[in-house]
Image: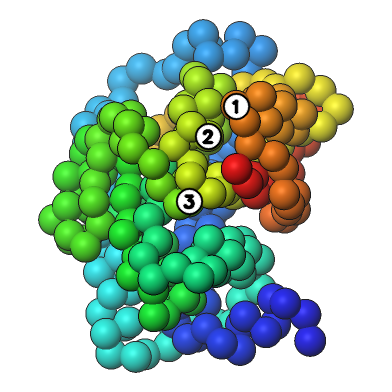
C-alpha cells in the first residue's frame, strides 16, 4: 500500500475529499491563461469593478467554507473519492513538524479562509495547532468572522516571529516580490518551510502570464525551479524533499508549459 493510500484510509472521507473540490473550483474557474512578455508591467483590462469582484469571490468562498464546517460537525461525507496528492503531502509535512511536540505553530501565507486548519486537526489529532493565516485585508476580515480559531494577519508583520512550519499553497505565483517574501519566510521558519502547488518551469527563466477568471484578469508568475530552490537555500535552509504535484492549466504562447510542484525545506 502506498503512503498516499495509507493516509487516505486514516483520513475522514469529508476532509480527504475537500481539497480536490478546492482545486477543481480553481482550475474550472480559469477561463484562459496567456504568456505576458511585458511581465508585471503588462496592462490589464479596465472597466472591472474590483470591489464587486472581491465581494463576489469572498461570498462564494464563505459559502463553501460554511458548508464544509457544517459537514465536519455532522460527520458527513463530501463529494466523490479523490486522488489529490497535495493534501496527503500536507499531512506528511504537518506530522513531520509535530514529531515529539504537543503544540505546533503554523503560518499559512495566502491561506484563503483557513481550511487547512481543519484539515490539519483531522490529520494530526492530539496536537494543539496554533494556526496563523496571512491574507489580503478583505479575506482576512472575512476569516476573522467565520474562522476565529485562526490568527489572522493582513500584512507581512506576520514574519516578525518564528513558527514551526511556514507554508505557501498555490499563493506564491501572485507575488511580484516573491524572492523577498521567501527570504523573510525562511527566516521565520523554525523547523520547516513548505512550498506547495507552485506553478513551475525548469528549462526557461521565470515568466509572467495573464489569467482570466470570473471576468477578472490578473497576473501570475510561473517560477523557475532553480530560482526558487536557490533563493531559499541562500536564506539558510536546505532542500529536504521535492514533490511533483500534477498538472497546471495550459498557458498560451508560453516558452514552456508549467507544472505544479512543491518543496519541503528544513532548517
Q: Residue furthest front?
A: 100
Hey, which quadrant is residue 4 in on the image? bottom right
Where disc 1 sits, the SS reads loop
Eyeballing the image, is 139 above or below 245?
above
Q: Are marks 1 and 2 in contact (CB under 8 Å)?
A: yes
Q: Residue furthest left?
A: 145
Eyeballing the image, is 241 above or below 44?
below
Q: CA distance from mark 2 to mark 3?
A: 10 Å
Q: Are marks 3 and 1 in contact (CB under 8 Å)?
A: no
Screen quadrant of the N terminus: bottom right
Expressed as whole percent of the image width and height from the top left, the position of residue 234 reads 66, 24
Q: Earlier in the sequence, mark 1 or mark 2?
A: 2
Q: Which mark is residue 138?
A: none
Task: Specify whether residue 155 is in view.
Answer: yes
Q: Earlier in the sequence, mark 3 or mark 1?
A: 3
Q: CA distance from mark 3 to mark 1?
A: 16 Å
Taking the spot 36% from the left edge, 17% from the top edge, the residue there is 46
Q: CA distance from mark 1 to mark 2?
A: 6 Å
Task: From the image, tell me which residue sits under label 3.
Answer: 165
Q: Earlier in the sequence, mark 2 or mark 3?
A: 3
Task: Specify whether residue 61 is in view.
Answer: no
Taking the spot 53% from the left edge, 61% from the top edge, the residue there is 97
Question: How many other residues sit within 10 Å of disc 3, few (<14), some (14-19) or many (≥20)?
Answer: many
Where disc 3 sits, the SS reads strand
Screen quadrant of the C terminus: top right
Hey, which quadrant is residue 145 in on the image? bottom left
In this rendering, position of residue 176 left or right of residue 231: left
Task: From the image, tell me which residue sits under label 1.
Answer: 235
Task: From the image, tell me which residue sits under label 2.
Answer: 186
Amino acid at each position: 500500500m502506498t503512503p498516499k493510500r495509507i493516509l487516505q484510509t486514516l483520513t475522514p472521507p469529508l476532509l480527504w475529499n475537500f481539497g480536490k473540490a478546492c482545486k477543481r473550483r480553481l482550475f474550472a474557474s480559469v477561463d484562459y491563461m496567456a504568456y505576458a512578455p511585458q511581465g508585471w508591467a503588462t496592462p490589464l483590462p479596465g472597466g472591472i469593478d474590483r470591489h464587486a469582484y472581491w465581494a463576489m469571490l469572498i461570498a462564494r468562498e464563505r459559502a463553501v467554507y460554511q458548508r464544509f464546517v457544517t459537514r465536519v460537525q455532522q460527520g458527513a461525507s463530501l463529494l466523490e473519492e479523490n486522488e489529490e496528492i497535495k493534501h496527503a503531502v500536507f499531512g506528511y509535512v504537518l506530522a513531520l513538524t509535530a514529531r515529539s511536540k504537543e503544540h505546533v505553530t503554523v503560518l499559512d501565507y495566502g491561506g484563503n479562509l483557513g481550511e487547512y486548519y481543519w484539515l490539519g486537526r483531522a490529520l494530526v489529532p492530539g496536537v494543539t495547532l496554533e494556526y496563523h493565516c496571512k491574507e489580503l485585508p478583505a479575506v482576512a476580515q472575512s476569516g476573522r468572522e467565520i474562522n476565529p480559531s485562526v490568527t489572522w494577519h493582513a500584512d507581512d508583520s506576520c514574519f516578525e516571529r518564528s513558527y514551526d512550519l511556514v507554508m505557501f499553497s498555490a499563493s506564491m505565483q501572485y507575488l511580484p516580490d516573491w524572492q523577498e517574501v521567501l527570504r523573510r519566510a525562511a527566516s521565520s521558519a523554525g523547523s520547516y518551510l513548505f512550498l506547495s502547488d507552485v506553478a513551475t518551469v525548469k528549462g526557461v527563466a521565470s515568466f509572467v502570464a495573464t489569467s482570466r477568471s470570473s471576468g477578472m484578469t490578473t497576473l501570475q508568475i510561473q517560477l523557475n525551479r532553480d530560482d526558487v530552490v536557490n533563493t531559499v537555500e541562500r536564506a539558510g535552509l536546505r532542500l529536504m524533499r521535492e514533490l511533483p504535484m500534477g498538472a497546471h492549466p495550459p498557458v498560451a504562447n508560453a516558452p514552456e508549459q508549467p507544472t505544479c510542484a512543491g518543496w519541503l525545506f528544513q532548517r
